Amino acid sequence: MNILNGADIPNINFDDGHLNNNKFHVTSDDKDVVVEVDEGSNALKLTANNLGAGFTSSDFRYELWFLAATGTVEVAVSQVHFTAEVVLQSQ
């Protein structure tokens, strides 16, 4: 889970605004993590359940007519389910 902590997220541009300098972080314990090996497909699968996660953006801007909102964004998410699978192939 340390790989996910502090992971950079690409800048997000949208009509009349943007979210820049974005980071993802895990906010709760990673106790419900399962690592499986699939020998048939030569893969390693990592599954994490019930994680808390967050997203921050230190450069937010949105414009509506003559009004402009700027600042930072902090988003908290609970009960995140995350699965990653790595398939190894030989050449």
Image: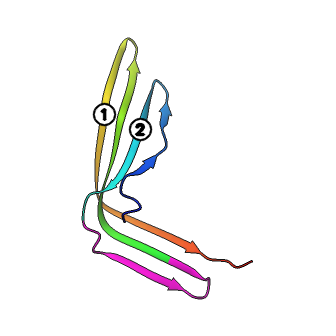
Dot 2 or dot 1: first in sequence order is: 2
Question: Label 2, on which residue?
Answer: 21
Q: Amino acid at mark 1?
A: Thr
**Distance Cα–Cα, label 2 vs label 1:** 10 Å
Position in image of residue 65 (x %, y %): 40, 14
Is-magenta flag for residue 36?
Answer: yes
Dot 2, how many residues are within 10 Å of its Cα: few (below 14), some (14-19), or many (20+)?
some
Query: Start and end of the magenta stretch?
Result: 29-44
Q: Under tag 2, what secondary structure? A: strand
Position in image of residue 64 (x %, y %): 39, 19
Residue placed most toward the observer, 76 or 23: 23
Is-magenta flag for residue 30?
Answer: yes
| Name of the residue lying farthest toward the top | 66
Question: Label 1, on which residue?
Answer: 72
Identify the residue at image location x=30%, y=45%: 75
Disc number lying in front (2 or 1)? 2
Q: Under tag 1, what secondary structure? A: strand
Colour scheme in the image?
Answer: rainbow
**Label placed on residue 46:** none
Q: Amino acid at mark 2?
A: Asn
